Image: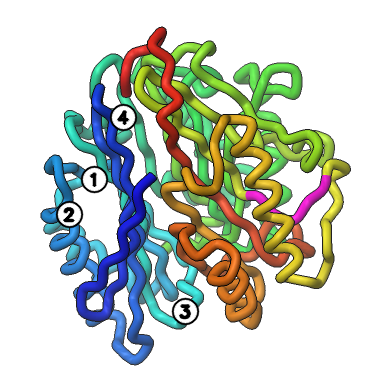
Amino acid sequence: MDLIRKTYDTTEVQITSFQSTKGITEYHLLFRQTDCMEDFHAQLQQIQEAYARCVTELPGNPVAIFRRYFLSDVTNQTDELMERERLSPYCALSIVQQAPMNGTKIALWAWLQTGVQTQVLPSGLFEARHSAYSQLLGANQCNRAANSEYQTRLIFRDYIMQLTDAGCTLAANCLRTWIFVQNVDVNYPGVVKARKEVFATQNLTEETHFIASTGIEGRYVDPMVFVTMDTYAVSGICPEQIQYLYAPDHLNRTYEYGVTFERGTAVTYGDRRHIFISGTASIDRYGEIVHPGDVMQQASRMIENITALLQEAGATLDDIMQAVIYIRDTADYARVKQYLNKHHPNLPHIIVRAPVCRTGWLVEMECTAVTDKGDERFAAL
């Protein structure tokens, strides 16, 4: 993984890239604003101008397959954002209220690849096709059912139908989900119940496997939407390519405390290995919170757990292409930022405000890593 930092006026960008001689080059871009005194209109204009300039400077003419905007006030900011997004090439577009912790109003994560053919499928999923594989991305999938449990059920029902239309299944092809929950302290139990029961109908159990996921506070523009979901699946993969990550010396299995997701998933292609690490906090192998009340120590244990998961896939922290760090208490930002600057200065990341699904967890991190540990038995991505 190569990391480059650039500054465009008031926008800072972290650029990571992975280049393979056999296939596509992929980039992850993390944009954040630096001037808290500008209004949203100015910050949005700056970040989109920086994005456009940055993309034109990247080798290989990459195209975006996924963008996620992190907003401070989704209710008042989404309309203007969508007006400007209509001028950009289409990709899977995620918008969530998770305020950037540096006091600005907007941040952006973008995933780009070279050499892919893209289209929107009739089902609504965004497809990026190359070689033997089709990457299928969905964003902001939601509905207005009565409560978080029923909304989650309908989201998964609709997504399963989308995958079926693409010749895929939830168990065989979905590699990653992000579930954003309005008022997570209240609405998360409904998500957990619905997901567990839906998974059981799809052969996703503790005896088989689950899906790497982050379940976290996040607000959608419609106040009647309590749950939204982003998704990533790949058509053309086989079970031999997939490895589920456990790090049993550091973490317990999630079903032991009633939830159903994998700690991490690695997928090996002919030219690379993708590693998706779920939202990971300060937890031990018994499922207990480590260092309650101490955000600095929790951040350290969080990184230790992620390191252990990456090691199972033959990766290190240096292979991380992008990371999102979630903080429950805004007052902890300075301490977490200080810890990262001191101990992990080359970690490409953004920090946003989003309470974790257990109130005692003060900080959580998710990430995507890529290594060159491919396997020639499989096609290149």
Q: Tell me the residue at 82%/47% (across/down).
A: 284
Dot placed on the residue nearer the N-terminal end, 3 or 2: 2
Dot placed on the residue nearer the N-terminal end, 2 or 1: 2
Read off the residue under disc 4: 123
| Label 3 SS | loop
Read off the residue under disc 2: 55
Whole-Å distance between the Cαs marked 3 and 2?
A: 24 Å
| Label 2 SS | helix
Read off the residue under disc 1: 64
| Label 1 SS | strand
Q: Amino acid at mark 1?
A: Ala
Q: Residues within 10 Å of mark 4 (few under 14, many from 20)?
A: some
Q: Nearer the viewer, mark 2 or mark 4?
A: 2
Q: Nearer the viewer, mark 4 or mark 1?
A: 1
Q: Amino acid at mark 4?
A: Ser
Dot placed on the residue nearer the N-terminal end, 2 or 4: 2
Whole-Å distance between the Cαs marked 4 and 3?
A: 38 Å
Whole-Å distance between the Cαs marked 2 and 1?
A: 9 Å
Residue 102 shows which numbered tag?
Answer: 3
- Of the pair 147 and 134, the residue shown nearer to us: 134
